[in-house]
């Protein structure tokens, strides 16, 4: 290539996901969390086709009058994907999906009778064959409880899940997805809540999220899992409010970001 030949930098674009994207979204999710201790506990024999299908179906459930009404109470699901255009040409119809984020937007105030509801724990039939339901309920269930208690029915934006393809790290996909959420929250004047994994905690701090609580899972005592060399369980996260987590504890941090003056507009689903 000549020194004078113009080159294009890779471009990441965020757009609303469609049902046609779901297979790529699921691929990204399970690749991103393949080495996560809780993910390995939830799928002790690997992810079955049934579990994969049940998880995929949760992204774009069929809309009915009942589900539309429930969305007012439970919030709107917003699924966004980050596409990579290696040659920098975003004019193509689609690029490679390298990340996704699933948000829940609660626009209206809810009464305590509406928000303070403990949902019955899911069963293996609901989650898919081979899923360890006890692990799922102990981990996901506890985080959902914290989410419910943190916002207390107030209007807010919630980040339910974000993942990026491991083979496409450090290209800005995660930053682009978080920026999209921040712009939406700022435009609407809403706080944002999330549960930070050990490895994602530092990124969220850079986006202005502050610690409001921790969920410490006694993963070694309860399931016998020992932290392997190089694996980070978040012992030093949220030290100011909870101290250093003891050995054998995996820490998730409940975080909140206050709305800032909106600098740009975003499209809402």
Image (spheres, rainbow, N blue to C red):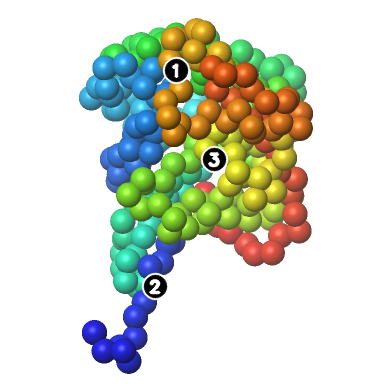
- Estimate the spatial distance between the alpha carbons at disc 3 and disc 1, rounded to whole Å: 20 Å
Contact (Cβ within 8 Å) of mark 2 with mark 3: no
Contact (Cβ within 8 Å) of mark 3 with mark 1: no
Other residues around mark 2 within 10 Å, as few (<14) / some (14–19) / many (≥20): few
- Estimate the spatial distance between the alpha carbons at disc 2 and disc 1, rounded to whole Å: 42 Å
The residue singled out by tag 1 in the image is 226
Q: Identify the residue at horizontal 31%, vertical 89% (top origin).
A: 3
- Estimate the spatial distance between the alpha carbons at disc 2 and disc 3, rounded to whole Å: 26 Å
Foreground: disc 2 or disc 1:
1
Q: Using residue 2 as the reference point, say whether residue 111 is left or right of it.
A: right
Residue 9 is marked as 2
Could you say which is closer to the camera, residue 171 or residue 89? Answer: 171
Indicate the position of residue 178 as horizontal and vertical percent values: 56, 50
* 83, above or below 194, in the image: below
Q: Which one is earlier in the sequence, the residue at label 2 or at label 1?
A: 2
Indicate the position of residue 21 as horizontal and vertical percent values: 32, 46
Contact (Cβ within 8 Å) of mark 2 with mark 1: no
* Residue 75 location, quadrant: top right
Tell me the quadrant of the picture where the N terminus can be found.
bottom left
Q: Which one is earlier in the sequence, the residue at label 3 or at label 1?
A: 3
The residue singled out by tag 3 in the image is 200
* Residue 224 location, quadrant: top left
Other residues around mark 1 within 10 Å, as few (<14) / some (14–19) / many (≥20): some
Q: Using residue 223 as the reference point, say whether residue 195 is left or right of it.
A: right
Other residues around mark 3 within 10 Å, as few (<14) / some (14–19) / many (≥20): some
* Residue 213 location, quadrant: top right
* 225, above or below 21, in the image: above
Does residue 188 show up?
no
Q: Secondary structure at mark 1?
A: loop
Q: Identify the residue at horizontal 62%, vertical 19% (top origin).
A: 246
Q: Secondary structure at mark 3?
A: loop
């Amino acid at each position: 290539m000549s020194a004078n030949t113009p080159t294009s930098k890779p471009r990441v674009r965020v757009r609303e996901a469609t049902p046609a994207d779901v297979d790529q979204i699921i691929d990204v999710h399970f690749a991103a969390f393949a080495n996560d201790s809780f993910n390995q506990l939830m799928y002790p024999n690997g992810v079955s086709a049934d579990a994969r299908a049940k998880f995929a179906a949760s992204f774009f459930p069929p809309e009915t009058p009942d589900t539309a009404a429930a969305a007012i109470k439970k919030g709107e699901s917003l699924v966004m994907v980050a596409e990579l255009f290696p040659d920098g040409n975003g004019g193509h119809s689609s690029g490679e999906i390298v990340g996704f984020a699933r948000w829940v937007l609660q626009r209206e105030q809810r009464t305590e009778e509406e928000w303070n509801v403990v949902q019955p724990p899911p069963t293996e039939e609901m989650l898919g064959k081979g899923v360890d339901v006890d692990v799922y309920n102990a981990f996901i269930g506890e985080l959902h409880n914290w989410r419910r208690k943190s916002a207390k029915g107030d209007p807010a934006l919630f980040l339910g899940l974000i993942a990026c393809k491991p083979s496409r790290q450090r290209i800005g996909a995660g930053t682009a997805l978080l920026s999209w959420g921040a712009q939406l929250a700022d435009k609407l004047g809403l706080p944002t809540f999330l549960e930070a994994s050990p490895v994602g905690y530092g990124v969220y701090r850079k986006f202005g999220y502050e610690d409001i609580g921790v969920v410490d899972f006694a993963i070694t005592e309860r399931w016998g899992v020992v932290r392997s060399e190089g694996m980070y369980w978040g012992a030093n996260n949220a030290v100011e409010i909870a101290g250093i987590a003891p050995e054998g504890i995996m820490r998730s941090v409940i975080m909140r970001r206050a709305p800032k003056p909106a600098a740009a507009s975003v499209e809402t689903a």
